Image: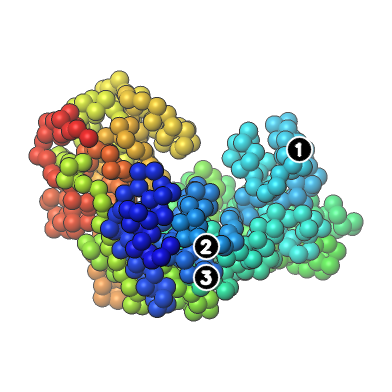
Amino acid sequence: MKTLTDAFAAGGPLADLLDGFQPRPGQARLAERIAECLESGTDLVAEAATGTGKTLAYLLPVLARGQRVILSTGTLNLQDQLFQRDLPLALKATGAELDVALLKGRANYLCPQRMDRADDGPGTLDDATAADLETIRRWARRTTTGEIREVGDIPERARIWPMVTSTIDNCLGSECPRVNDCWVLRARRQAQEADVVVVNHHLLFADLALKQTGFGEVLPGADAIVVDEAHQIPDIATRFFSQSVSAWQLRELARDTLKACGTAEGTLHVLREPIEGLEHALQQLTASAHRLPERGDWNRLRPLRTELDDLADALRALAGALSPLEARSRELASCHDRAAARASTMDLLLADDAPGVRWFACRRGRLTLTLTPLDIAEEFRKLRSERPATWLMTSATLAVNGRFDHFTRRLGLESPATEIIDSPFDYARQTRLWLPKDLPEPGDPSHTETLLERVLPLLKASRGRAFLLFTSHRALQRAAAWLRANSDFQLLVQEDAPRDALLEEFRAGPGRLLLGAASFWEGVDVRGEALQVVVIDKLPFAAPDDPVLSATMKAVRESGGNPFSELQVPSAVLALKQGAGRLIRHAGDRGVLVLGDPRILGKSYGRIFLNSLPPMPRVATGFEAIDFLQQWRP
């Protein structure tokens, strides 16, 4: 490869390696910008619209320098795609000879020690779990990676998986009797020795925040960190800077402590009472919490203060009972550390001057108590100063009305280079935008049904082949009920089946509508004739009763800012861009985007949303939208 410009040219190495390769000026421009920032050591925040080819745009300049680099993606599937497809291609294009490694979180690897102990008790395994355990043990004798995704015939949510994988809490680290067989340790050592390491965002922050204890860090020595799907980073960073205690963690602690008694004679009679005390206190709290909403601020827990105090006391009692027994076994020492850490977090949560916002989640009876910092900028700056590297952050959705302030302010990024790369797609030819008029306001009970009445002729004209994206599960369920009563479409509804299964069924042919909420707004890629319409019911403003958002808005207001324009609008704009981005994924796609929120035209801030979308020509009526689909020719 002579120069980056040559690499992306019609006669360059990418053209030789990719069938149908066409030069894209935006792709070459992004690659050049990245090379400039790597040379100067300047951080870069870049929005590269769908179709840019941003993966190769950052891989080629990064690999060409031959320095150590961390590549972080948003999901495990994107990790695999980057490692198995894009990286080998980029290495061929650059001619670079570099060692590469793929590293996932520890929950993705078999733990031989926990597998050995999985049926030690307490209690006996049910027949299905026992059969799964035997399947895993047979697989364990032949695997070369230890990645549990290789065991395709055991469901992801099967009861056996937490029993044969490790967490930060229950990992025994270097003192594990099977440390030489540890798949996590092997993967981390390969990563430490590699020139290029592919991780995901959760693992990146776990390592940055030093939460992956036991085996050392991966990141020291990295010259550059490339963050793809970077729009996810502020929320992921916030979660990693939070502290929490969950009912599940405490049940596992009680279970593991009881199991640890089996390896240290004479400990059960000392620990039985504090273990039972923890289980009783947890049972009392969860029983009292069953009427709580799914999320809420700490004030909703005031009637449960006695149960919360009892739980904190029980954790301290268990930690105290374990303290003199630490030397008896590594398992007991690990349980002591976990009990002490959870007790410390509970004390922090119960303090009235806790540094952040305290809140709870109680979904399907699973109670979690969390302390979240209101501002992560300083914490993020501190982490980065301790591990200097050039950060290159890119996504299709980072800018709001052409500016990056919302993103850079949240992360405390000081004067990064910025770049916006427009999509190479011909939106004027490939798309239309329809904003139905005279719809009820979003809060009106009839909004969902009225919107569906308006778009039904368009859905029929496209023979289904549409995504209907909703800002709430309640609206999604109402829409599903209305469509079942008023249409003959096959409905594929979120939570009726795994996402991948729904998408596979959707791609199978016409006559299908896919109805989704939050998780279908991004990371979903359906190309070609299979998807021709995307309907978004409302502007995706975050729920105002979200405790973290509410506290953050209050802080902004008290500092003299405007929380609506500084927080709520930018977040909603980015979410809308993600949802709208499902429509056109390839140069041969065509389709209509329908936005069913009258505030887009009726409120002054609506212009910000429209300006942030791709340049889609608007149609005034559903008939025009139908005509576009019927008359368009590729």
Element assignment for label 2: loop
Residue visible at 70% across and 59% down in the picture: 185
Mark 1 or mark 3: name the one nearer the start of the chain.
3
Mark 2 or mark 1: name the one nearer the start of the chain.
2
Residue 227 x/y as whole percent: 44, 62
Residue 212 got which mark? none
Residue 84 x/y as whole percent: 53, 49
- CA–CA distance between discs 1 and 3? 40 Å
In this rendering, the label closer to the viewer, 1 or 3: 3
Residue picked out by circle 3: 67
Element assignment for label 1: helix
Badge 2 amino acid: Ala
Where 473 falls versus 306 (above or below)? above
Residue 429 x/y as whole percent: 17, 42
Element assignment for label 3: loop
Marks 2 and 1: CB-CB under 8 Å? no
In this rendering, the label closer to the viewer, 2 or 1: 2
Judge from the rendering whether residue 46 lies leftward or rightward of residue 62; answer left or right: left
- The answer, for residue 285, to whether it is visible in the render is yes
Residue 150 x/y as whole percent: 63, 41
- Nearer to the camera, 595 or 257: 595
- Nearer to the camera, 271 or 512: 512
State which quadrant residue 368 falls in: bottom right
Outermost residue, right side: 265
Judge from the rendering whether residue 222 lies leftward or rightward of residue 338; answer left or right: left
Residue picked out by circle 2: 96
